Structure formats: structure tokens, C-alpha cells
């Protein structure tokens, strides 16, 4: 009778009909549940933490412990290289913050990050709007989407090699510029003190805009058509529809993207290291390359830890705004 | 089973795996039947050499060592140079350095200061080893910490076809001849530059190989009584000489961001007439451009200089970790690699010059370019003053920054050298 239904009994009554022998077990579980409810309040409160403990332990070991160690290193004189490091308090912070190279690296990082985030947003939004248009058929749209996303698919190493080749004084770009007569001399894109910082910023913009494009495209596709229809009925033109419907609808995504991008870009190392190494002289020195050189070239691990901790604080500052914004949106 | 019991077991399993993951690795495997007391010792050997040698050739040498030394096994940890450096630095910092490590002379001082390298002088004494056949030993405070296994010298490579086209009869032997040749070779219309100078701050070894090498080639020095002496006439004349070439447009464009590999690439593609480079690049150049007609010559000396010429070099050095639980076995491996026969084999497959004075690599007899290089090698002496200096790479970078400012006209030579001297002194006083 109940052969088919017994495979997945849908109610307690049906369960009892199918498995009469389980009655005792259910009753036992019920009695255990009752005794569980009688557990002391403290023990009851600890149970969720016991379930969470593997995750908490992993977080502590993989994230909190290294951060704590780096902070601890930053408060001593040269750890690792020095067998008996001495406690120096915040002296390393005073030294790092007063270092002119660190200050230049900070300014370069802020320029590099700020411009990258701004142009990632502008380009990403522009391409997302283009790809969201109804004027293009689904097939070409998919094709364009694939092409536009390519820069984001490459790793930073590939991007660095690719652009080093393109921007080489004997590279393709200089050849085209000379051939078209736009310039009369080869341009040293990555070796010129005037151009290098803008060049690496441009490369980073090129490499990062597809992330915005994909995210904003998803956001655009989620905006209900009714809003635009209502806008048109009210007599809004294209610009007004964009300003009063599209942008407000995309704002939560844009804020999240910009904050995450700010944190990621501020930590960019591979691209800078593989294109300019922080040079020429120090015009493309970033906080990441500055820290790396302190650790692996000067073997000043305490100062490197200090610099790394300053980067962490800057990132956490942005992360704090991000979390606050997210919490506000959730409420 | 009770859900709570299962959860508890899972938590315990996670704890156990984490503790196991953090436990130190024991390199001594289970007892095995061997002549050395019944235990097999596994030596870790971190180096960047294996990927740069023909596939399987370095492992074959290790197999030979294992066959000669039952009870010792070698686990090779190989990677590119930069990765190896980071691994060795991290290993030294964490006290987990491999038993035997490949070393660059530029790293030695810092590792010794850190106490992470064992004194090879002590190990040699314990093994009653006669060190007279070692071509060189890198010593600090009277003890040896690194032995160069093979050496790569840096002569000048010249593109013979471009030389002929420019009407230059013979490769330059003096700075004046070099400057003249570099200017004649430079042909912007055909994308050809006379010389190439890599000054990237990412890899500042251009200061060692392409700048200071000119000082050593004329018997000069950048040091005095163990301290930096960058403002002396020898360094000054080289800086002025290079500035002259830079201002004349005879140096390939983009020098400030070029790296060593860019230099070799440009020469290989026939866009550069001359470069100072490692002999290790000969085979790569031949593979990539079999048509390239090039020769090797000694680095030109200052006009009128008649003495012996210092020849810049880079070594594949070897050292033993201070924390190695098997120093005697580690020394056996070093001794094996430094033996005349094995060192000949290794230098032959690496296209390098041997670290054992009694070794002779095969290529000297069979390859005319290497034979020419060997002549250059024998006529001069190995010179690299960065070997054994503290934070050597950083010193190169500090000089590089000041030198770039001088080259692009942002500061005078006096300021550049004085600033570099001051920056170096800071590192020597620490």
C-alpha cells in the first residue's frame, strides 16, 4: 500500500504507518530533547561555539595569528635577522611614517589606486551599458562580452609581460606611433620619469575594468523595465532615465565594487614589480613594492612588518566603510 | 551514533590535522637496511640550478651520489632563481632552511649575520678535506660559508655582422674603442643601438654586471679597506664614460626599466651591437637565433691600462644550513659536487667554468666561442666585489637610483656618487 510513499514519508502519521518500529526511537529522541532543554544555561550557550570552533580555529590560525605576529614584529628592532630582538614600541612606526620614500610610495599608491578605481568604474559602466543595449543581437552581444572580459582573465604576470612587449621602445605601440607620424621619437613608456606612473596606472585600468563591467551588467539586467516605462510616461529623456533610475539602482553595487577594488588595487604588487620594479628612480614605488624591498632586499623585517601593518590599517579603514555601508543597506 | 558525539569527533579530527600540519617535518625516514647505521638520511637540497640544466641531468648526478653513498638520499627542491631566493630567505628566517642550499654570493653576508649558514671550514676540518683544489671560497670572519660550484663569467658579446656593416674591423679592447664602436653601431633608422645597459630596479644586477664590471676590468675597486669607496677616480671615470655613451644616444632606449633578460633578447634579435653578458646565455642565443653571427671578447679596459683584467662573474654557490641535523652527510654532498670529475661534468652541462681547479669542462675543446671565453678567463681574474657584502642587492639598487638621476641629468656626478656613498655607508654601519 505505502511502498511508493514510504520512500519519502511526508508526515508523522505516514511515518508511523510505514515504520512502526521507529516509534520507540522517536520517543527516546523526544525524551533526550527534553533533557537537553534542561541543560544549564551556560552549557547551552557554549554549544553553538563548539560547532563553530573548527572555523574559528582556522580563522585564528590562518588570519589572526599572522596579523598578530606581524604587529608583534613591528614593535621590535630587526626581528629574524637579529637573534635577540629588542622591544622598541612604536619607534618603527615613527621611522616609517617619516621616511620620504614611504611618503612617496603612499602618494603613488593613492594616485594609482584612485585613478584605477575611478576609470574602472567609468569604463566598466560604459561597456556594461553598451552590452545591455537592445540594439545588438544576442550572438554579437555574447561575442563582445567575451572579448571585453579578456583582460580580466589574464594573470598579472601575463599582463605585465604583454604590456612590456607592447610598450617596449622597439614595441608595437611605438612602431605604430612612429609609422603614423604622431611622434617623431620613440617613447619610453615605462622608463620615463614623467610617464611611468601613468603608464602602470593605465595597464591596471585595462586589466581591471571587466570586473566592473560584468558586475554592473548583472545589475543593469536586474533593473525592472517598469521603472523605465514609468519614467518615459512621465516624460523623462535618456539622460534623466540614467540619472534618476539607472544610477540609483546601481549605487549599492557601485559602492561595493569601488570599496573592494580600492582594497585590491592598493595591494597590487605583481604588476608593478614585473613592469617597473618601482622605478625609474622611485616614481612607481608603491607601498607593496616598498614593503617587499624592505623585507627581501634590505632584510629589515621589522620595518617591513611595520609598513605591512600600515597597509593593513589603510585597507581596514576602507573595509570598515564597506561593512558599515553593507549594514546600512541590510537595515 | 549520537550527533553530538559525531560533532565532537569532527572537532577533534580538525584539531588533530591542524596540530599534525604544524608539527616539524622529520627528514629521517624509517630505519632501512644500509651501511650507515641502518637509517636512511634524506637531505633537502634547495637550488635554482636544476631548471637551468638539461632535463634530468642534475637528478642523474644526485642518483650517482646516492649510489656512492648508500643511506643518503637527496630530495631536490628546485625553482627559478627569484623563487629560490625567497624560499631560502624565508627558510633562514623560520629556521627551516634545507640541509644544503644553492647560494648567490650576494646573499651570503646576510645569512651569516643571521646565523643560518654552517661554517664549511669546520665541516671540512671534521671530514679532513683538502681544500687546495677549490678555485674559490667565500669567507667571512675567517670562515668559509659558500663555495662556488661553477662560475659564469661576463665577457662582452659582439654582433659581428653589425660590426662589419658599421666598418669596425675588430672588437674593441679599450674604452675609447668601445665608445667609438658603440656610436658607429648605433643606427636609429634600423632600430640598432651600440650597447645595452639594463638598469631596472626590480633586478638591479645591471650595476654589478654592466656598470661596476668596467671598474674591475681596469683593476679598479669600489671598496677601500672593507668600506665603500664610490667617490674614487676609478668609479668616477666609469660613470663619466657611461654618461658619455648615454648622452650620445649609443645606449638602447628604455635602459631604466630593462632587465637582464631584455638585454639578451635585444642582442639575440640583432638590435644591439654589444652587450656584457653571462656565458650561460650562449646556448640560448644560438637556439633563438641560429643565424646570429657573434663573438666574445674581454671587457675593454681604460686607455693605457696594461694590468690583468678583472672579469665579473656570478656563481652557483653552495652552503650548508646551520640547523641541518645531518651536517656530515650534507658536507658529503658538497664534496661530491666539488670533486674534479663531477665538477667537470656539472660545468660541462651548465656551460660554466669549474669551481675545482683540476676540472676541465668538455666545451673548451669542442666549442670555439667557449674556447675564446676560456682564454679571456685565463688571461684575467674573477672579480665581483659585491660577493660577501651586506644587503648586496640593496646596495646595487641604491647605486642604481643615484646613477639613473645622474644619467638623466637630474643631478651632478659628484652628487650622485656622494649620495650613493652615503646610502651605502648607512648599510655598512648597521
Image (cartoon, coloured by chain):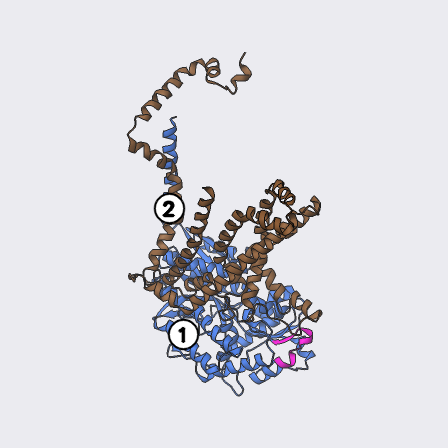
Chain colours: A brown, B blue
Q: Name the residue beneath numbered marker 2.
A: A60
Mark 1, Cα crowd under 10 Å, few <14 / some 14-19 / many 20+, is: many
Magenta span: B182-194
Q: Position of residue A159 (x, y in %)?
A: 58, 58
Mark 2 to mark 1 CA distance (whole Å) = 41 Å
Is residue B7 depicted above or below B311 in this figure? above
Question: Tags 2 and 1 in contact by the CB under 8 Å rule?
Answer: no
Q: Position of residue B1 (x, y in %)?
A: 39, 26
Q: Which mark is residue B424?
A: 1
Outermost residue, bottom side: B304
Host chain of mark 1:
B
Residue at 61% x, 68% y: name it: B366
Nearest the viewer among A233 and B115 is A233
Residue at 55% x, 76% y: name it: B375
Q: Position of residue B241 (x, y in %)?
A: 54, 82
Marks 2/1 same chain:
no
Amino acid at each position: 500500500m505505502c511502498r511508493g510513499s514510504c520512500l519519502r514519508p511526508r508526515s508523522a502519521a505516514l511515518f508511523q504507518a510505514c515504520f512502526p518500529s521507529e516509534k520507540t526511537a522517536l520517543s527516546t529522541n523526544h525524551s533526550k530533547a527534553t533533557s537537553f532543554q534542561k541543560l544549564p544555561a551556560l552549557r547551552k550557550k557554549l554549544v553553538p561555539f563548539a560547532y563553530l570552533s573548527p572555523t574559528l580555529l582556522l580563522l585564528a590560525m590562518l588570519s589572526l595569528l599572522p596579523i598578530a605576529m606581524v604587529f608583534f614584529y613591528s614593535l621590535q628592532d630587526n626581528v629574524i635577522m637579529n637573534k635577540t630582538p629588542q622591544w622598541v614600541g612604536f619607534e618603527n612606526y615613527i621611522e616609517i611614517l617619516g621616511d620620504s620614500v614611504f611618503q612617496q610610495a603612499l602618494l603613488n599608491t593613492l594616485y594609482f589606486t584612485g585613478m584605477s578605481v575611478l576609470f574602472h568604474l567609468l569604463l566598466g559602466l560604459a561597456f556594461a551599458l553598451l552590452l545591455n543595449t537592445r540594439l545588438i543581437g544576442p550572438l554579437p552581444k555574447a561575442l563582445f562580452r567575451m572579448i571585453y572580459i579578456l583582460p580580466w582573465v589574464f594573470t598579472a604576470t601575463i599582463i605585465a609581460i604583454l604590456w612590456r612587449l607592447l610598450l617596449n621602445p622597439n614595441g608595437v605601440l611605438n612602431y605604430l606611433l612612429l609609422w603614423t607620424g604622431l611622434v617623431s621619437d620613440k617613447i619610453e613608456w615605462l622608463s620615463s620619469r614623467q610617464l611611468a606612473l601613468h603608464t602602470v596606472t593605465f595597464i591596471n585600468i585595462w586589466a581591471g575594468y571587466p570586473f566592473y563591467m560584468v558586475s554592473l551588467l548583472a545589475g543593469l539586467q536586474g533593473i525592472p523595465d517598469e521603472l523605465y516605462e514609468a519614467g518615459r510616461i512621465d516624460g523623462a529623456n535618456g539622460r534623466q532615465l540614467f540619472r534618476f533610475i539607472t544610477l540609483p539602482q546601481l549605487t549599492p553595487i557601485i559602492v561595493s565594487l569601488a570599496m573592494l577594488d580600492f582594497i585590491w588595487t592598493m595591494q597590487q604588487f605583481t604588476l608593478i614589480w614585473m613592469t617597473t620594479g618601482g622605478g625609474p628612480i622611485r616614481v612607481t614605488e608603491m607601498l607593496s613594492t616598498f614593503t617587499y624591498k624592505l623585507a627581501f632586499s634590505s632584510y629589515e623585517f621589522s620595518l617591513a612588518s611595520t609598513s605591512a601593518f600600515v597597509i593593513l590599517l589603510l585597507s581596514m579603514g576602507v573595509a570598515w566603510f564597506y561593512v558599515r555601508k553593507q549594514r546600512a543597506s541590510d537595515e | 551514533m549520537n550527533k553530538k558525539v559525531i560533532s565532537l569527533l569532527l572537532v577533534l579530527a580538525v584539531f588533530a590535522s591542524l596540530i599534525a600540519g604544524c608539527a616539524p617535518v622529520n627528514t629521517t625516514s624509517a630505519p632501512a637496511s644500509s651501511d650507515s647505521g641502518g637509517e636512511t638520511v634524506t637531505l633537502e637540497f634547495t637550488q635554482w640550478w636544476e631548471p637551468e640544466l638539461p632535463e634530468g641531468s642534475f637528478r642523474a648526478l644526485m642518483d650517482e651520489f646516492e649510489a656512492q653513498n648508500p643511506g643518503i638520499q637527496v630530495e631536490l627542491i628546485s625553482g627559478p632563481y627569484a623563487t629560490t631566493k625567497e624560499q631560502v630567505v624565508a627558510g633562514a628566517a623560520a629556521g627551516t632552511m634545507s640541509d644544503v642550499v644553492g647560494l648567490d654570493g650576494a646573499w651570503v653576508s646576510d645569512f651569516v649575520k643571521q646565523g643560518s649558514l654552517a661554517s664549511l671550514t669546520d665541516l671540512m676540518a671534521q671530514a679532513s678535506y683538502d681544500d687546495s683544489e677549490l678555485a674559490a671560497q667565500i669567507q667571512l670572519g675567517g670562515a668559509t660559508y659558500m663555495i662556488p660550484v661553477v662560475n659564469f663569467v661576463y665577457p662582452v658579446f659582439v654582433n659581428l655582422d653589425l660590426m662589419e656593416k658599421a666598418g669596425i674591423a675588430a672588437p674593441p679592447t679599450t674604452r675609447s674603442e668601445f665608445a667609438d664602436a658603440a656610436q658607429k653601431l648605433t643606427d636609429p633608422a634600423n632600430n640598432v643601438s651600440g650597447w645595452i645597459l639594463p638598469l631596472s630596479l626590480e633586478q638591479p644586477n645591471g650595476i654589478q654586471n654592466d656598470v661596476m664590471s668596467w671598474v674591475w676590468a681596469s683593476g679598479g675597486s669600489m671598496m677601500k679597506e672593507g668600506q665603500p669607496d664610490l667617490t674614487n677616480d676609478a668609479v668616477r671615470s666609469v660613470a663619466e664614460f657611461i654618461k658619455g655613451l648615454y648622452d650620445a644616444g649609443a645606449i638602447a632606449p628604455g635602459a631604466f626599466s630593462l632587465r637582464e633578460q631584455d638585454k639578451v633578447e635585444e642582442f639575440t634579435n640583432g638590435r644591439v651591437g654589444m652587450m656584457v653578458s653571462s656565458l650561460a646565455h650562449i646556448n640560448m642565443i644560438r637556439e633563438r637565433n641560429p643565424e646570429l653571427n657573434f663573438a666574445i671578447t674581454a671587457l675593454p679596459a681604460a686607455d693605457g691600462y696594461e694590468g690583468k683584467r678583472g672579469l665579473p662573474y656570478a656563481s652557483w654557490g653552495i652552503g650548508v644550513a646551520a640547523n641541518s641535523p645531518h651536517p656530515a652527510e650534507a658536507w658529503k654532498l658538497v664534496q661530491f659536487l666539488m670533486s674534479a670529475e663531477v665538477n667537470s661534468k656539472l660545468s660541462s652541462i651548465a656551460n660554466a667554468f669549474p669551481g675545482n681547479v683540476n676540472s676541465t669542462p668538455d666545451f673548451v675543446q669542442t666549442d670555439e666561442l667557449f674556447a675564446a671565453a676560456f682564454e679571456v678567463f685565463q688571461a684575467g681574474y674573477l672579480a665581483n666585489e659585491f660577493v660577501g657584502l651586506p644587503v648586496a642587492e640593496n646596495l646595487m639598487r641604491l647605486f642604481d637610483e643615484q646613477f639613473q638621476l645622474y644619467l638623466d641629468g637630474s643631478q651632478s656626478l659628484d652628487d650622485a656618487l656622494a649620495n650613493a656613498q652615503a646610502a651605502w655607508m648607512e648599510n655598512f654601519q648597521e
